[in-house]
Amino acid sequence: MKKILFICHGNICRSVMAEFIFKDMVRKAGREGEFEIASRATSREEIGNDMYPPARRCLTGHGVPFERHFAAQVTRQACEDYDLLVCMDDWNLRNMERMFGSDYAGKTVKFLDLTPLKRDVADPWYTGDFEQTYRDLVLGCEALLCGSPAPKHFLNNR
């Protein structure tokens, strides 16, 4: 089983949207037994909060099911437990480095580096553009599900 952890700043928009989008894709592909999927934050400011309402509305509008969510911060134990740590932007990658050094560099990837876009997933908390974020997340999740380039250890255990 592949364990994937999506990571963003607060775990109320991008990472949690990616979690539920990917869970929905995995379910529709009949591959639930192949993955464990979760999301976390690099910051502590939203801990315990549910998904941001516009993020919920965006998922609902696209027919993506979700459940009650409680934002949580990424921990060293989570980094140990998950096979792939998927950060939404360069800032998240720097925060992970600040928090854990280079301990998990071999299993950390920037989300859209899995796609031809090779850029950050913009934070809709600031941009207000949840539709663009949704499109980026779908593209990245499709690449992840189809086996897009990922850290070698992740691919070697497929």
Image (tube, rainbow, N blue to C red):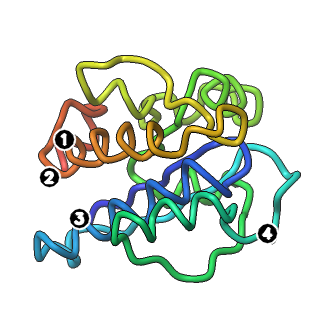
In primary-sequence order, the first of circles 4 and 1 is 4
In primary-sequence order, the first of circles 2 and 3 is 3
The residue shown at (41%, 34%) is 111
**Circle nearer the viewer, 2 or 3:** 3
**Circle nearer the viewer, 4 or 2:** 4
What's the residue type where badge 4 is placed? Asn
Q: x, y (%) of residue 154?
A: 27, 43
Q: Residue furthest bottom?
A: 67
What's the residue type where badge 3 is placed? Met
Q: x, y (%) of residue 62?
A: 35, 63
Q: CA distance from mark 2 to mark 3?
A: 18 Å
Q: CA distance from mark 2 to mark 1?
A: 5 Å
Q: Are marks 2 and 1 in contact (CB under 8 Å)?
A: yes
Disc 3 designates what residue? 25
Disc 1 designates what residue? 155
| Count of numbered circles on the image | 4
- In what element is the residue under mark 1? helix
Q: CA distance from mark 3 to mark 4?
A: 25 Å
